[in-house]
Amino acid sequence: MITLSGVHKAFGPNRVLRGVDLALPKGQSMVIIGGSGTGKSVLLKCILGLVTPDAGTIELEGQDVTKGDRDAFLARFGMLFQGGALFDSLKVWENVAFRLLRGHQALPKDQARDIAIEKLRRVGLKPTVADQFPAELSGGMQKRVGLARAIAAAPEVIFFDEPTTGLDPIMSGVINTLIREIVVELGVTAMTITHDMSSVRAIADRVAMLHDGLIRWTGPVAEMDAAEDPYLQQFIHGRAEGPIESVR
């Protein structure tokens, strides 16, 4: 579905991506792991076209992401942001239906609201939540609203940026289960950025480890624990000693 070949990106002297090669199979869930500052978010922004790579190519089903109709390209994506990124001044249903209410193909308000309530139900929220404001919800409920918004426009690809950050272990498990169910039900291609190894094991079909601007290892999640790459093993087991230098 998405193919990256030799992708480089630097900000001044800081070479963040140094030749990333990666393929995201259609209909599968790929999880990108790696330490803070290794370029995971920059990689995601390059795919979305928010950042322009210095070199290399990124293709969506064989088409260069930098060419063609930008609006049509972005319409194929959904996004669950790390901090929720809900609009405080909009009601919950308006947040979920945000994309549906805008653009040249905007839906009537009543129809958009019905879709929003349906998506809220899908993530385990009652219709009464629809008319509340984000500030009235718990962190876990806000994350569910963000997930409902991500799937509202029936995207082909969904990005999840640290989906369990700030949540307790129980709610993290709930969100992981919802993500896995939705990916399977909708048949979407998913890419997740996370530090949470419980999330990796719960939602991944494939895993890729990004370190020092390069993909160190990629493969099925079932093969992750037996992989011999020392960078991968240090990271997934949280070891202080190993090739990844820690700041002390």
Image (cartoon, rainbow, N blue to C red):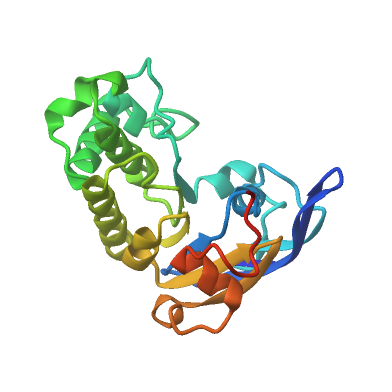
Left of 150 or right of it: where is 7?
Answer: right
Res 3 seen here? yes
Q: Quarter holding the N terminus?
A: bottom right
Q: Where is residue 248 shown, x and y percent of the image?
A: 63, 49
- Seen from the viewer's position, the closer of residues 23 and 222 is 222
Q: Where is residue 190 shown, x and y percent of the image?
A: 44, 60
Q: Where is residue 194 shown, x and y percent of the image?
A: 46, 54
Residue shown at 22% from the left, 39% from the top: 120
Q: Where is residue 7 shown, x and y percent of the image?
A: 74, 62
Res 24 seen here? no
Left of 69 or right of it: where is 167?
Answer: left
Is residue 58 shown above or below 167?
Answer: below
Is residue 189 shown above or below 159?
Answer: below
Residue shown at 61% from the left, 63% from the top: 210
Is residue 125 shown above or below 59?
Answer: above
Count the numbered circles shown.
Answer: 0
Q: Quadrant of residue 226?
A: bottom left
- Seen from the viewer's position, the closer of residues 52 and 216 is 216
Left of 174 or right of it: where is 29?
Answer: right
Residue shown at 52% from the left, 65% from the top: 235
Is residue 128 shown above or below 14?
Answer: above
Give the residue furthest to the top: 89
